[in-house]
Amino acid sequence: MPENKSFLIELWDFLKIRKKWWLLPIIIMLALVGLLIIFGQESALSPLIYTIF
């Protein structure tokens, strides 16, 4: 096993080995909300994001 595994590989191994597939939608939604917050802060995409909500 390599010593320097990336976070995503370790997370995938955790989900696969422990059979915690119900965590996958939660993780995906948290990532999407995080991306919306990052892109919503005074960027050119702000007006488009605000119209969604």
Image (cartoon, grey):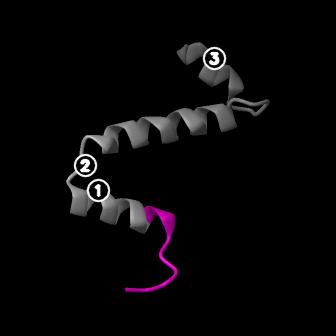
The percent position of residue 13, horizontal first and vertical second, equals 32, 65
Residue 29 location, quadrant? top left
Q: Residue at x 54, y 17 (%)?
A: 52
Return the residue at label 2.
20
Type of residue at label 2? Lys
Main SS of the magenta part reads loop
Above or below, comparing residue 52 to residue 4 in the picture: above
The reply, left or right, for residue 34 in relation to residue 1 is right
Name the mark nearer the viewer: 3 or 1.
1
Task: Identify the magenta region.
Answer: 1-8
Q: Residue furthest right?
A: 42
Mark 1 vs 2: CB contact within 8 A: yes
Q: Residue at x 25, y 49 (%)?
A: 20
Return the residue at label 3.
50
Above or below, comparing residue 22 to residue 47 in the picture: below
The reply, left or right, for residue 43 in relation to residue 7 is right
Towards the viewer: 32 or 6: 6
Q: Pointer 1: residues within 10 angstroms few (<14), some, or many (20+)?
A: some
The percent position of residue 26, horizontal first and vertical second, equals 38, 37
Return the residue at label 1.
15
